[in-house]
Image (cartoon, coloured by chain):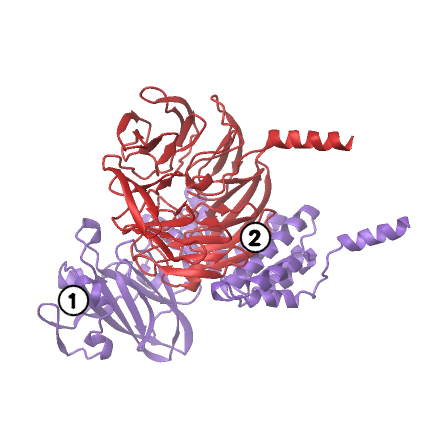
Amino acid sequence: MKTLSIGLFLVISAGMAQADWLQFRGPNATAVSTDAKAPADDLKIAWTADLPGRGLSAPIIVGDKVFVTCSSGPGQETLHVFCFNASDGSKRWERAMRATGRTMSHNKTCVAANTPCSDGDRVFALFSSNDLFAFDLDGNLLWLRGLTFDYPNASNSLGMSQSPVVIDGTLVVQSENDSESFAAGLDVATGCNKWKLERPKAANWSSATLWKGAVALQSSKGILGVEPATGKTMWNYEDGASTIPSSVVTGDALYAVSHGITALAPEKGSVTQLWRNEKLNPGTASPLVLGDYIYVVNGAGVLIKASLKNGDELWKLRMKGPFSGSPVAAGKRIYVVNERGIFQAIDPEAPEGKVVQEIELKETVLSTPAISGGAVYVRSDAKLWKLQ
Amino acid sequence: MKSTFVCLFAVAVLPLYAAGELSKPIEALRSVQKEGEGNETAAKAWQEIVKADASNLPEVLKGMNGANPLAENWLRAAVGVIADEALKAKTMPVEALVAFLKDTKNSSGPRVVAFDLIHRADEKLAEELTPTLLEDPSSDLRRHPVAKLIAAGDAALDKKDKDAAMVAFGKGLVAARDEDQIKTLTKKLRDLGQKVDLPKHFGFLMSWKLIAPFSNADRGGFDKVYPPEKELHFDAIYEGKSKKVEWVDFTSADEYGKIDFNKPFGMEKSVVGYAATDFFSEEDRQAEIRIGCKNGWKVWLNGELLFARDEYHRGAKLDQYKLPCQLKKGKNTILVKCCQNEQTEQWTVEWEFQLRVCDATGTAILAAK
């Protein structure tokens, strides 16, 4: 009987297994879900949760928990971290903190602009004010930092949005701006610096990616690959890169948002350029790779499909834009939400690409969706939706 | 055996701390410093505090008094956890929280938290308390009664009672400290034919001596020490960027106190200007110099550098930077360095700043003369 129970438990657990979406653009910042179960083709709003403040940050999903950040108050000084039940959208816990850094930002963005990340045990929530909080999954505060309290000129009056990444016990945060510009690797257990690097003195809203054991720090100067544990340089691509859309990686190459898209194969001490297509020019949204193709949303809201092998363009699909959030994908579908809140599911295998479903969320959406357990999660300034 | 088990269970679920026993873990949270120092100890202490009974909330709030902003957040998070449980169990110590709120010797941060907890536990009571917060030392707490006065004025206008509206809006403006409410009230009062002196309300310093342009080629002027940083001789003539430069008098006509270098010196690029003024204080006191500026800038008070910021054209707003300082009785000299960069886009024309002297609440400190 006991054996049977264990067997049944394993079967049930395997059936329920879902891939987590632990950071901005999900697994390894690829924007592609690794879930065995992709969202269905006829998505509907499964539930909606109210949010008390603004946010461009994306939700992240750890097991059956959805984490979202918001900022509220007249000067957006109140910083919220929420944990919802993925199953029904009920609130598990909320923590409300106070910004210790500057909260000024351009009207279009806000203080909750950086997407949180998780190592599966902890959630790391960074805000534009440079406040950083680490919670366990039950909402216990593990540590905090005030990076502008520590480094008083680390801020950007337009707001900051670089999302952190976590790898092998190191949380990598960037606060790249015109003045006191830096990246740092923090101990996930204590929040203390393992290393801190000076970065180019220039405003930067792009986020790091992880490639073959390196943290790839993108800036206007290029992309610097550093060892996560030490911050030591592994390789350096110095031909410039975007300061808004972030690059994307596969197992074979790093597709840099640099002079359009430039495919790179960085190795220790060197970076080989595989190809470059200057016409693959992302607007605000970051590119994604699905199968053998790279997809770019340009500034006019046109989705461009190109070959991963050589960057050659295959088709263009005009979508309903404009877009601030980035596309994500699962199975054979790409999902993106425009600024007017129109969720669009795209079949990228159709001869010229095809929008196969639209859902009007009727709110301004400036964020990137998240995918887990066959569902897509989208947030606005006032709501979090689960589409399933 | 059964009763032993029940007793053991009861002990296990009882809060570990009764009122007054949290001083050590609170002190551990108050000890956190920059760059994560104290985080490990604080994490353990935080776990102890959140197990406390709701009756401890005033003590934890008191722990926030005078704490640095990091420690305040540690304690704020602990208060949140205890309060969530208290709300569920309906054990929020409302009376003690009201006493904490009313004691203005407590810091602004925890008093704002206390008011929020009262509001969550007893909305009606919070509404009753709101008018008493009109002259509160906390600008956050003032927002509530000011909002009520705006609503009252609007309601009076709906009833065509212009006099009552003017009284409500006027009272609101006197109390308001946040820019959005001040702007709203100013417009409403002016629409009713009332005069509003915004420079006086905010405490902008309007009259300065200016000198420019010195070179800011390659943005190197930001760190270059030009003569006004060494001496303030207002009759001196110096070598400027391309010609001799001298001090000129400038009084702003802008009601948000903008000191615009482009006006006396033309729309120069890659240049540095200085502004100096004297501020007479009635007493030795703590204050804040608040500056809004989208150029690179430095501010000195009586020769002491308060802060320097080398960011260009990312935006400016009222009270963008708050610089705590110590005023001395009598004359205090304020020197501002304002750097324009090389950008040529239309949105990079501004070469200006606004500056006011106020207390930590944002209440203007007006010059003695």
Q: Chain of mark 2?
A: B
Colour assigned to chain A in the rendering is red
**Rendering quarter of residue A342:** top left
Nearest the camera: A233 or B66? A233
Q: B77 or B40: nearer the eye?
A: B40
Task: Report which residue position mark 2 lands on.
Answer: B116
Q: Position of residue B209 (x, y in %)?
A: 21, 71
The mark total stands at 2
Which residue occupies 40% across, 78% down? B283
Question: Disc 1 and disc 2: Cα gap in Å?
Answer: 51 Å
Residue type, mark 1 in image = Ser
- Residue B192, relative to residue A40: is it above or below? below
Looking at the image, residue A42 sits to the left or right of residue B1; the answer is left
Q: Position of residue A201 (x, y in %)?
A: 29, 58
| Residue drawn where x is 64% and y is 57% of the image | B47
Q: Position of residue A344 (x, y in %)?
A: 40, 27
**Mark carried by residue B215:** 1
Q: Position of residue B96 (x, y in %)?
A: 66, 60
Judge from the rendering whether residue B332 lies leftward or rightward of residue B12; answer left or right.
left
Q: Which chain is purple?
A: B
Observer-side mark, 1 or 2, equals 1
In-front residue for pair A157/A196: A196
Secondary element under disc 1, as helix, strand or loop, is strand
Graded by Cα atoms within 10 Å as few (under 14), some (14 to 19) or many (20 or more), the crowding at tag 1 reads many
Toward the left, the furthest residue is: B243
**Residue under mark 1: which chain is it in?**
B
Reading the chain from its start, which is encountered first: label 1 or label 2? 2
